[in-house]
Image: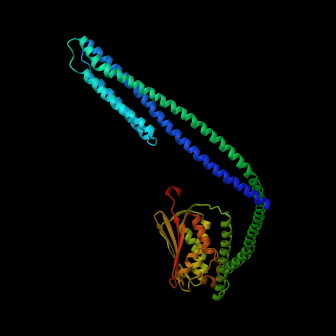
Amino acid sequence: MRRDIIRRFQAASAVIGLVAFTAAVGLASWAALDHAAYLLQRASYSQRQLELFGHLASRLNRAVADHIRALALEHPSDVADWQRDLEQQLDALTAVTAAEVALVADNRDEENSERDELAEIARWREDIRALALAASSSPASSPQAALQEFEQQARHPYADSLATRLQQAADDEHGEIDEVHRQMDTTRRHLVLLGIGGVLAHTVAATAVARLVIRRREHLEAEVARRTASLQQANDELQRVDDCRKRFFADVSHELRTPLTTIQGEAEVMLTIGGAEDSGYRAALAAIQANAGSLHRRIDDLLAVARSGDGQIALECQPLDLCSLTSTALSDVNGLARANDVHLTSTLPPRPVWVMGDASWLKQALLTLIDNAVKFSRPGQDVILSVVPQGERVSVAITDHGEGIAQADLPRLFDRFFQAPAGRQRGGSGLGLAVARWIVEQHGGSIAITSAPQAGTTVTFFLPVPAPEAIA
């Protein structure tokens, strides 16, 4: 235990030291990179100034030469043109130098030096204007006199002096560029040293942490293996329980369907062949037949719940007439309705209402909902079933006039195995509405229920209407 604590302390110390050193290296690297960016900008400004110095010197020499040629040939010289070109070059040079002044604002000496350059540029501008004024003055009596006058008043005092100062400024900028390159080399070496130091520090710290990480990983791997085995064992147990459940439902289906089918068949035979005129006897047979059918449907509900949870159901959808399917379902429940003295009525459109669906499953949903309505109706009351097309969907509503459902129970009616008090009194399973909702939703529809105490209940489900070409 003590050794483990010491190792953890050493690893923590290594990590803290690594973080501190990394932060220091990061700050130093950031400062070096920031200085490198500053140097690159200085070099860019100096390079641009050198280009402008060259343009100025070239244009000045050409302007002087052109003017001398014009004097010799007694042609007028376009002084305004070359003066405008030279002043535009000076404007560009002033803008670049002003930007460099702003860049070096944190260094007083360099800022003063750049401001001296701005003052020098202003003096160049005055020299160019004086040169242009001298060149545009009234010509002398002869070309030779004019040339001599230009040499004395303009060329030597302004042009030659300006060219010399331009060359001196260019030399100074070359010196600045050389200094920038020297500082860049120094900064590059600093970055290399910082990188090497960072790698070495990370290597040392990583070696110290690696041992703890390895031990921790081994512990985690052992824990993962233990939990994986536990999960596998639990999964095997769940699979065993699921297999038992599947076998249970299969056995229930077989064991219950066979006697129910026999009871229902015998009742139908006795009702068909007659021979018993006693109305009570025939009513008892009808009740046996109806209740056997109801139990049969409950078994179907149980199997539907099991299969829906397993994802084993594959709907066989095809075009079907919902009105015809509804009539068939009403006919199947008619025996149960007679046994409970409940009247079944329907409101159906005169024309077929087509939907895409699995006839068997949709019929089971209808049987479940009608069966519930009959079960919760009082003797002598009506259960009304209506089919109403509503544009892109069709609604099917089953309404009874029973005692209704409390508002607090409505949100849970579609939950599996939930039963309102009235349902428990009548021995329901709590599966019917859950199965009906599952079937409707598998068909892309929705289902809702409205009810109030002593005001009856209406269950409505909606199915999408397919495009005409789908049922053609």
| Whether residue 431 is situated above or below residue 285 in the rendered picture | above
Residue 77 place in picture, x, y as percent: 26, 19
- Residue ID at (64%, 88%): 280
- In this rendering, the answer to whether 197 lies above or below 124 is below
Establish if 342 lies above or below 300.
Answer: below
Task: Point out the image quarter for the N terminus.
Answer: bottom right
In the picture, residue 189 is in which quadrant? top right
Residue 119 x, y percent position in the rendering: 36, 33
Q: Quadrant of residue 358?
A: bottom right
Residue at (58% x, 47% y) in the render: 27
Query: Toward the viewer: 332 or 359?
Result: 359
Q: How many marks?
A: 0
Q: Is residue 408 above or below residue 387?
A: below
- Front one among 217 and 85: 85
Image location of residue 369, percent across then percent down:
58, 75
Q: Would you say residue 325 is visible in this rendering?
A: yes
Please say whether residue 74 is visible from this viewpoint.
no
221 with respect to 436 (left or right): right
Percent across and percent down for residue 463 are 53, 65
- Who is closer to the viewer here, 75 or 314? 75
Question: Tell me, what colour scheme is on the image?
Answer: rainbow
* Residue farthest to the front, as pictured: 109
Instruction: Name the image quarter holding residue 193.
Output: top right
Judged left or right of residue 242, residue 105 is left
